[in-house]
Image (tube, rainbow, N blue to C red):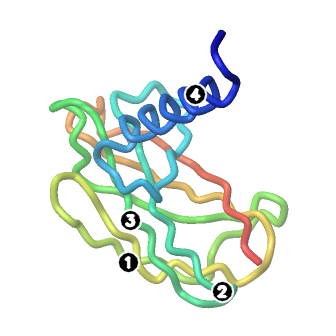
Amino acid sequence: MIRPSVVTGLAAAFLIAAQAHAHACAPQSAVELSSDDESPFKAYADIQLKALSEPFNVDLYFCGGENSKVERIKIDAIMPAHQHGMKYKPQILELGDGNFQATSMFFHMPGIWQLQVSAYHLSAENDKPILFTHDIKAQ
């Protein structure tokens, strides 16, 4: 008979292995972004959120095949409940290998914000971006 602690340990090991595989191109602290579109790659964000009304950075990582290299991005954040966005436009730095950093992100109100990333990639038809999102609670 297998002891429950062994089963729990095995389940945890499989979960850790799955997470490590999912984050192969991004730090473990990064979260996977959602996309409504069929995307040839996955997007991850390492969100370095600070206190409310303090600028913060978001590092973006795109994992996928050769034809899915991201060439450029646009990034914004909105408050869906209030139907407004940030007061400032973030700056985007290319980090190489299709990865980016958005600086000067700024949440000026507490509540739920939705990070919105438009990724333009090599295999896109008509230069149509793939939209990735992630909800963030600012306090």
Name the front one of labels 2 and 4.
4
> Which of the two discs, 4 and 3, labels the residue nearer the N terminus?
4
Answer with left or right where residue 55 lies relative to residue 51. Answer: left
Observer-nearest residue: 32 or 100? Answer: 32
Q: Earlier in the sequence, mark 2 or mark 4?
A: 4
Residue 8 falls in image quadrant: top right
Residue 16 placement (x, y as % from top left): 47, 39
Q: Amino acid at mark 2?
A: Ala
Residue visible at 37% across and 48% down in the picture? 119
Is 44 drawn above or below residue 126 in the view shown?
A: below
Pointer 3 or 1: first along the chain = 3
- Secondary structure of the residue carrying tag 4 is helix
Query: Label 4: how many residues lie within 10 Å, few (<14), some (14-19) or many (20+)?
Result: few
Report crowding for label 1: few under 14, some 14 to 19, many 20 or more residues within 10 A (C-alpha).
few
Tell me which amino acid carries mark 1. Gln
Badge 2 crowding class, 10 Å Cα cut-off, few under 14, some 14 to 19, many 20 or more, is few
Place of residue 72 in the rendered image (x, y in percent of width and height, measured from the top left)? 27, 55
Q: Residue at x 30, y 63 (%)?
A: 100
Foreground of the two, 32 or 112: 32
**Helix, strand or loop at disc 2?**
loop
Residue named by callout 4: 11
Question: Can you identify the residue that label 1 sits on?
Answer: 91
Q: Is residue 16 above or below residue 52?
A: above
